[in-house]
Image (cartoon, rainbow, N blue to C red):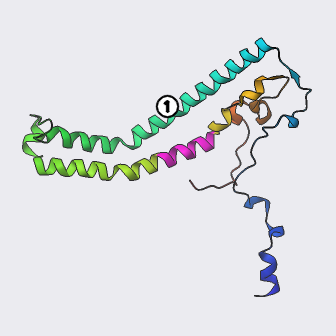
């Protein structure tokens, strides 16, 4: 190897765009600029309950988004398995026209098997879509640690990032990550 190739491998020559994961938000209380005054016991409990309720709401919104994406992506599997079970003689044995003319027991069994076979890749696709969407919308930045409720004057994460969950802040389009 030449000296130029060896210099190219050194870590000092990396550009700013080579960073793949942005820095994590500060969790320690020393990064706060305002003086930290402890809340009273009642105020601390009230803020803790408020933060816990906000985190629960964000958690439920994440679960609803994941369920909606899974339902949309898994719709072909649901339909195929439904028609397979509906027309099979040992399961439901419907009297519908398509069950009498088109689907017999063998084709119904094939539909059931096909539905369960294509389920695994579709679950992977659905979770990749959810993770990509959650990363783009910065959904996990909405969670607040309960330690924020202990002190007065502590900045919340969304006040530092330019809006609730940092959505108002411009997205960094140069950061790439594979899911």
Q: Image check: 127 left or right of 141?
A: left
User: What secondary structure is marked by label 1?
Assistant: helix
**Residue matched to label 1:** 64
153 shown above or below 111: above
State yes or no: residue 136 in magenta.
yes
Q: Which residues are magenta?
A: 127-137
Q: In percent of the image, x 62 and y 43: which residue is there?
A: 136
Furthest residue toward top:
42
Measuring from the top left, give residue 96's x and y in whole percent. Answer: 11, 35
Residue 88 position by quadrant: top left
Q: In percent of the image, x 23 and y 47: which residue is there?
A: 112
Measuring from the top left, give residue 45's x and y in whole percent. Answer: 73, 16
Q: In percent of the image, x 40 and y 37: which residue is there?
A: 71
Q: Main secondary structure of the magenta part?
A: helix
Measuring from the top left, give residue 125's x and y in whole percent. Answer: 45, 50
- The residue nearer to you, when weighing 85 against 171, is 85
């Amino acid at each position: 190897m030449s000296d130029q190739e060896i210099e190219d491998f050194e870590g000092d020559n990396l550009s700013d765009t080579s960073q793949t994961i942005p820095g994590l938000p500060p969790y320690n209380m020393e990064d706060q600029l305002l003086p930290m005054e402890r809340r009273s016991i009642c105020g601390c409990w009230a803020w803790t309950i408020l933060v816990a309720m906000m985190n629960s709401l964000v958690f439920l919104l994440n679960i609803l988004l994941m369920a909606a994406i899974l339902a949309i992506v898994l719709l072909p599997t649901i339909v195929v398995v439904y028609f397979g079970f509906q027309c099979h003689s040992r399961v439901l044995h419907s009297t519908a026209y398509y069950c009498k003319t088109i689907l017999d027991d063998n084709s119904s069994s094939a539909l059931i098997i096909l539905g369960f076979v294509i389920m695994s890749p579709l679950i992977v696709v659905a979770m990749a879509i959810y993770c990509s969407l959650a990363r783009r919308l910065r959904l996990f930045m909405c969670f607040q640690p309960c330690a924020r409720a202990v002190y007065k004057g502590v900045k919340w994460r969304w006040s530092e990032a330019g809006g609730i969950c940092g959505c108002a802040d411009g997205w960094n389009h140069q950061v790439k990550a594979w899911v």
